[in-house]
Image (cartoon, rainbow, N blue to C red):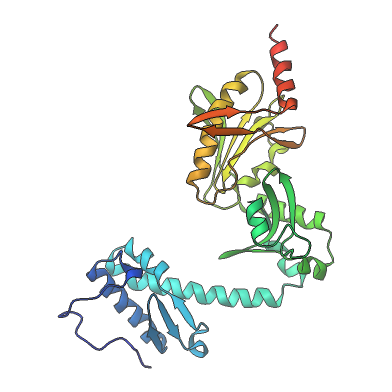
Amino acid sequence: MFSFFKKKDKESEAIDIPEWAAFSTAEEYKAFLDAIDSYFKGMDVTYILEDGTIEVDPDSFRFSKLGLSNIAQVCKQHAIEDYPELINGHFTTMLKTLEFDKTFDENITDFEKIKQYLAVRLYNAKYIAYIGGLDDDTEMSVNRYLAEDVFAMLVFDLPDAIRNVQPSHVLDWGKDEDELFAIGIANIRENYPMEITQEDMGGFSIWFVNNDHFFTANILYELEARPELVGRQGSLIAIPHRHSALIYPIEDLGVVEAIQKLIPAAYGMHEEGPGSLTPNLFWYHNGIFTRLPYEVREEKLHFIPPESFLDMLNRLENRLH
């Protein structure tokens, strides 16, 4: 074993904290380096400390280069005495993930072995285009249009990552895409229960869906199974980011006030993130998602409803007379 840390007395000399660890104090940075050194000594692994990374011998550790910024930020949020345990857990998880990925890739053509990891996740159209999913010549994903700028994509929901299913995988399995999407939706339904609450928003109630996982927007696949979420004239729906959804069942002209409250909420939540999905507000009715266009100009909201939505409002108004 050989370590490339400089053999100087860190206790008596000032510690030069690099830019990638600028959030640390001198005491924290020294403790971090000591914990890193102790971990790799314990693994009997040769390493070289560079600027925010560690180079290791892949024959002895399976990786050739390891980033330090993320684990350093994690350590920053904890007491110094916890650093060794945090670092051990971080690198142990990396090794387990590598082993899992290796086994998964070896079995990826065996549908029965991988179908439990199939999932459907909603993405913004810009992301689908970015990874090569909207052009037949460069298609690298299996996706379906859902509403305006929202697409459903078939993915692998793995223990430590989400990976997109590629068209070549579907060909290997010899499965129909309808079947695959149905399995993916069912897996999410089973693995990720939805936290749904009714909240007051300035005098009227909305259904608020909020979860830590990345599949909250999949509530759109559960609407017909949850009658409380859909009114006689459908529902207003916003899915601003991956962790939240706002739903207002339409029963009467209270929908007009709801629109005035939901649009700013959806717009602000989309801007804030994380995992922004769409700032749009949708009208769900008879299984169809229709965008309700709006513009924010000079801090004022301008709502531009489509004819079908106006017709519905007129029918509601006529019932009052």
| Residue 178 sits in quarter | bottom right
Indicate the position of residue 120 as horizontal and vertical percent values: 69, 54
Identify which residue, 149 or 318, lies in the foreground: 149
| Residue 234 sits in quarter | top right
Indicate the position of residue 179 as horizontal and vertical percent values: 81, 56
Query: Is residue 159 visible from the viewing direction of this image?
Result: no
Indicate the position of residue 294 as horizontal and vertical percent values: 60, 32
Horizontal relation, residue 83 to residue 121: left or right: left
Q: Residue furthest top?
A: 321
Horizontal relation, residue 61 to residue 120: left or right: left
The structure residue drawn at horizontal position 71% and vertical position 26%, both measured from the top left corner, is: 309
Indicate the position of residue 92 as horizontal and vertical percent values: 47, 75
Horizontal relation, residue 233 to residue 239: left or right: right
Identify which residue, 184 or 266, lies in the foreground: 266
Q: Residue furthest bottom?
A: 1
Q: Is residue 181 above or below residue 227?
A: below
The structure residue drawn at horizontal position 70% and vertical position 6%, both measured from the top left corner, is: 321
Q: Is residue 102 above or below residue 116?
A: below
The structure residue drawn at horizontal position 65% and vertical position 62%, both measured from the top left corner, is: 131
Q: Is residue 21 above or below residue 237?
A: below
Q: Residue furthest left?
A: 12
